[in-house]
């Protein structure tokens, strides 16, 4: 059996292959292109293992290797650094380090959802990013109005408000407004695409919670993936980075703010949803919990409800 460590870059992939006895069998570099990756895979046999770090462009490589029948592990870069940090760092050392972690079964794995979930995740993340860009343009328009000491009574981005902005005949405002409206058109296209996934059972389940709509439900669903992979709700909360940081020395235990280590999109949308829930259903068990406990732990409850309802087949109440 061979153990293959891949250090992935945008232009190339540096690899190290270890044999069963732990010796370096092969080392080199290939172009990061599917054609060359397939050619590289012809050097290996069934049962050989591959590992790579989770980067922003791992998916095509991961899918190609997996499609050829090989098992691939995706390593968490932060945890790999903690386990195997070296004074000397280069691509060859990184790929060998990954291969040795793989051989010793020490790879701190990152979860990889199936292709369908990853595709939906990309769509909703695109919508998030475009919405953030549109908000940025709105802020620029607000700042330009402040700079010019122009005040408008009401929402400046209604149809009437936009007519007012156009009437100012300000070059910068017109540029920002044109860009904003172009992005809003693209957001509508994505929202139409999102509607196609409204019939998923997990999404229907999440929407039953007041404060969670279709878009929010899809973010939660795609960021968690298979909810039962967490053995208990505490681990799911930790995955979202919503668990409190803990410092302990002897008998002294300090619990601080949430760790913020985990899925950032999941943590963000849960925070948004909980504030809406408090407005829409102020007398729910969740809202009552809010009034009697520290606010920082409130957003962990929907995760626990979701996981338990998935196990039991009941809708959360």
Image (spheres, rainbow, N blue to C red):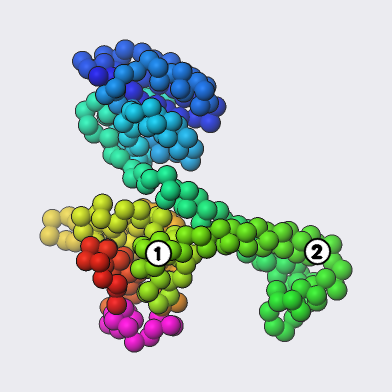
Q: Which segment is the magenta one? A: 278-292
Q: Chief secondary structure of the magenta span?
A: helix
Q: Using residue 109 as the reference point, say whether residue 152 is left or right of it.
A: right
Closest to the observer, 161 or 66: 66
Residue 75, horizontal then vertical, whole percent: 34, 37
Position of residue 43 relative to residue 291, above or below, is above
**Mark 1 Cα within 10 Å, few/some/many (few <14, many 20+)?**
many
Mark 2, residue position: 174
282 in magenta: yes
Mark 2 or mark 1, which has the lower sequence index?
2
- The quadrant in which residue 240 appears is bottom left
Q: How many marks?
A: 2
- The quadrant in which residue 102 appears is top left
Residue 1, horizontal then vertical, whole percent: 25, 19
Residue 203, disc: 1
Of tags 2 and 1, the one toward the viewer is: 1
Q: Residue at x 46, y 52 (%)?
A: 121
């Amino acid at each position: 059996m061979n153990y293959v460590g891949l250090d992935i870059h945008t232009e190339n992939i540096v690899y190290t292959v270890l044999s069963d006895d732990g010796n370096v069998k092969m080392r080199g570099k290939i172009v990061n292109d599917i054609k060359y990756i397939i050619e590289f895979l012809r050097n290996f046999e069934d049962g050989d293992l591959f590992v790579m770090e989770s980067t922003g462009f791992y998916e095509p490589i991961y899918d190609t290797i997996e499609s050829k029948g090989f098992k691939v592990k995706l390593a968490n870069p932060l945890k790999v650094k903690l386990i195997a940090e070296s004074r000397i760092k280069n691509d060859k050392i990184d790929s060998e380090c990954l291969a040795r972690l793989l051989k010793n079964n020490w790879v701190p794995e990152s979860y990889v959802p199936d292709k369908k979930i990853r595709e939906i995740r990309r769509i909703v993340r695109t919508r998030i990013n475009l919405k953030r860009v549109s908000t940025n343009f709105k802020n620029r328009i607000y700042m330009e109005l402040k700079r010019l000491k122009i005040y408008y009574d009401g929402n400046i981005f209604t149809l009437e408000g936009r007519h007012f902005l156009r009437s100012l005949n300000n070059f910068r405002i017109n540029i920002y407004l044109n860009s904003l409206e172009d992005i809003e058109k693209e957001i509508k296209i994505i929202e139409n695409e999102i509607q196609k996934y409204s019939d998923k059972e997990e999404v229907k389940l999440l929407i039953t919670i007041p404060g969670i709509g279709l878009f929010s439900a899809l973010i939660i669903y795609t960021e968690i993936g298979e909810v039962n992979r967490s053995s208990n709700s505490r681990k799911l909360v930790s995955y979202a980075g919503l668990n409190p940081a803990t410092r302990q020395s002897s008998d002294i235990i300090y619990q601080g703010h949430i760790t913020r280590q985990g899925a950032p999109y999941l943590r963000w949308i849960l925070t948004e949803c909980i504030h809406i829930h408090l407005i829409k259903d102020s007398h729910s068990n969740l809202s009552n919990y809010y009034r009697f406990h520290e606010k920082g732990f409130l957003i962990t409850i929907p995760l626990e409800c979701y996981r338990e309802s998935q196990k039991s087949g009941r809708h959360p109440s």
